[in-house]
Image (cartoon, coloured by chain):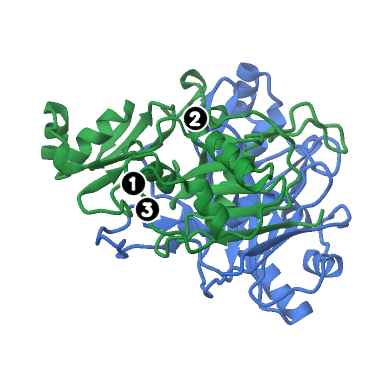
Chain colours: A green, B blue
Amino acid sequence: MAGLSIRPVEGLPEIRPGDDLAAMIVASTEPLHDRDVVVVAQKVVSKSEGRVVALSTVTPGDRALAMAAESGKDARALEVVLGETRQIVRWAHGVLIAETHHGFVCANAGVDRSNAGAPDTVVLLPVDPDASARRLRDAFKARSGRDVAVLVTDTFGRAWREGHVNVAIGIAGMPALRRYVGQYDPEGYELRVTEIALADEIAGAAELVMGKLDRCPVAVVRGLALEAADDTAREYVRPKEKDLFR
Amino acid sequence: MAGLSIRPVEGLPEIRPGDDLAAMIVASTEPLHDRDVVVVAQKVVSKSEGRVVALSTVTPGDRALAMAAESGKDARALEVVLGETRQIVRWAHGVLIAETHHGFVCANAGVDRSNAGAPDTVVLLPVDPDASARRLRDAFKARSGRDVAVLVTDTFGRAWREGHVNVAIGIAGMPALRRYVGQYDPEGYELRVTEIALADEIAGAAELVMGKLDRCPVAVVRGLALEAADDTAREYVRPKEKDLFR
């Protein structure tokens, strides 16, 4: 195997609702190749899709007001978070870990105030990040003629381990998981680790060149011998009844 | 930023206790550069350090026998796992999530039967994976003259998300975390994600070229502008009192 390369896409302007993100990426990067993986931070996808809320437009409800009183957090921001939440997984010491409507478990249901592009504004996760990834993939095909995979990513915290890692919340054109089920080592033992979270590892790899401060929300990963697949990031959602940590 | 490259180190033989792993890696790879990150799978590190147990030598105690009766698992393997365990975090449906003596939370306290190199044998995590990484780093310096960082890695499952990802359990010569604490976006908001698990993301990136079936346990990551640091992988261990999922 010749190895991988991971390159940042630099020079993108601030993204606004309605922007043609795929066109802007194609204009900012060297030519795409077939089977490249284009990794795009959720924040620019959400902004281009208008998933941005000015807090001045939000009226907090009773629950958000109570949580704000308890924690000192902004009640309007909590109201937006609760709107994105299917179920609160933990609420303690002002930390809110929530299951989003997509099924992802993350802080504040993915609602974030930093790098929102305007004051007193929050950015939400895309309504359907897999659909966002598919639209970008189709747009890259239309604009560059290349058949690439696309990941929409966000940085999530983990249980037990400090630090956040970038993970895939939307996938198009590649497998979510590399499956070793039913494969055996040279001694005949079935492999213990039967599923590698391939797209999550690619998301983390891309984050290494994507800056949070220097406006570099896109990277291109080249050299992976990926099969085509129609997987979505929903493959990562562990069914509640299988999860020992809910 | 010019981007990263990630290359597998191929052609390593089966590793045996006492093998000079650093010498074998230097002999198998193109010349190392200063600031490369050499990512080494725990299994070959453990094997070179003799952290291998033949199950025929193990006498299970009462607790392992009870757990084996409950789950149908091998009592001798469970005995080894319990010896590596500081605290059982979950034991349900035959799945054992344990805190290791290092403080890591993972399945079976990191004890693994696949790719053990011999039948009825299990491989344990290194006693001190940070020390293993430091020894490898020193040996690379001695043998190649290059000042590289080293990660010792293993594939861990996660709460809430399906699939395993490769993470760093031993670190030498680089920071564990990229810290954004006290840094602000263009609108003046402090960044929400204040710590990125840099070494974990590098571990995952390297895994993309490291095969579980084709004996490729080492990769070289080039192009990261890493500061020197004396961090260890213990930086990832979240203190129990801060952890909402224990």
Which numbered marker is on residue B193?
A: 3
Give whichever of discs 2 and 1 has the lower sequence position: 2
- Residue at the (33%, 54%) spot, across then down: A115
Look at the picture and state if B119 lies above or below B26: above
Image coordinates of residue B147 in percent, x first then y, are: 66, 78
Q: Nearer the viewer, mark 3 or mark 1?
A: 3
Q: Label 2: chain?
A: B
The residue singled out by tag 2 in the image is: B90
Viewer-closest of B184 and B137? B184
User: In this rendering, do the residues under marks 2 and 3 share a single chain?
Assistant: yes
Which numbered marker is on residue B242?
A: 1
Q: Label 3: chain?
A: B
Q: Is residue B79 left or right of residue A113?
A: right
Which numbered marker is on residue A218?
A: none
Viewer-closest of A83 and B227? A83
Can you name the residue that lies furthest to the bottom here?
B145
The amino acid on which the numbered mark 1 sits, given as a three-letter code, is Lys
Distance between the Cα atoms at labels 2 and 3? 28 Å
